[in-house]
Image (cartoon, rainbow, N blue to C red):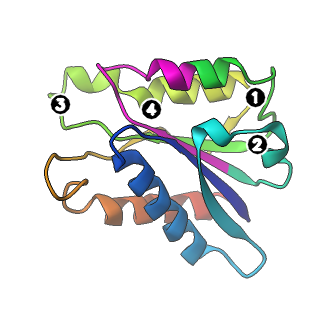
Amino acid sequence: MNVLVSTYSIFGHTKLLGQTIADAIAEYLDDSGHAIAISMHDNVVSTLADMDLVIKGSLTHNMELPREVGAVLDALPKRWCRGVRITVFDTPYRMNALLMRFTAARKLDRKLRKLGGKRVIPPETFYVVEGESPREEGEVQWAQARTAQIRSKR
C-alpha cells in the first residue's frame, strides 16, 4: 500500500503529527508499500497516480478550515482524487464539546469527498497543547491505533 500524508501547518504541530502518522503507517505496511509526508502546497495531480490512500491534515484556525487550505483544494481539478481512499485529521487546541463541531477535519473531509475521494474512516481530531510538547499525552499512540484501523480496511 502506498500512502500520501499531506499536511498544512503554521506552527509545526500538524506537520509534526502528519510525519508521525506517516511513520506509523510505514511501520504497518508490507515491503511493497511506503508512506510519504508532504506539505499540502506540494499537491500535484501526478502525486496520486500510485497512491492507495491519501491522508490530509490541517490545523483548525478560528474554528474553521484555514483559507489557504480551502484555496489549495478549490484550485484542484474536478474529481482530483476520484476513487482514491481518503481520511483526514486536524490539530486544534482542546475546546469545549459545543465548539468541537467546528473543527477543520469535517470540512476537509467534505471537500475531499467532493473531489471524488472515498472515506476510509471518519475525520479524526488530535489535540495539541502550547509549550514544549506539541501534542497532548497519548495522541501519538491514538494516531498509531487509527493507522491500524486504516490498514484493516484495505
| SS under mark 1 | loop
**Residue closest to the far bottom:** 31
* Residue 95 image label: 3
Q: Marks 3/4: CA distance?
A: 14 Å
Q: Marks 4/2: CA distance?
A: 18 Å
| 56 in magenta | yes
Residue type pointed to by label 3: Met
- Find the magenta span and give its range: 54-70
Tell me, yes or no, whether the two marked residues, 1 and 2, touch with CB atoms within 8 Å. yes
Indicate the quadrant containing the C terminus: top left, top right, bottom left or bottom right: bottom right
Q: Marks 1/2: CA distance?
A: 7 Å
The percent position of residue 48, horizontal first and vertical second, equals 79, 46
Task: Check disc 2: other Cα within 10 Å, few if <14, some if 14-19, many if 20+.
Answer: many
| SS under mark 2 | loop
Q: Residue at x 52, y 44 (%)?
A: 7
| 102 in magenta | no
| SS under mark 4 | helix
* Residue 116 image label: 1
Residue type pointed to by label 2: Val
Compared to residue 99, the image places residue 25 above or below, namely below
Residue 119 at least partly seen:
no
Task: Check disc 3: other Cα within 10 Å, few if <14, some if 14-19, many if 20+.
Answer: few
Q: Earlier in the sequence, mark 3 or mark 4?
A: 3
Compared to residue 17, the image places residue 69 above or below, namely above
* Residue 88 image label: none
Disc 2 target residue: 84
Q: Marks 1/4: CA distance?
A: 17 Å
Q: Earlier in the sequence, mark 4 or mark 2?
A: 2
Residue type pointed to by label 4: Ala
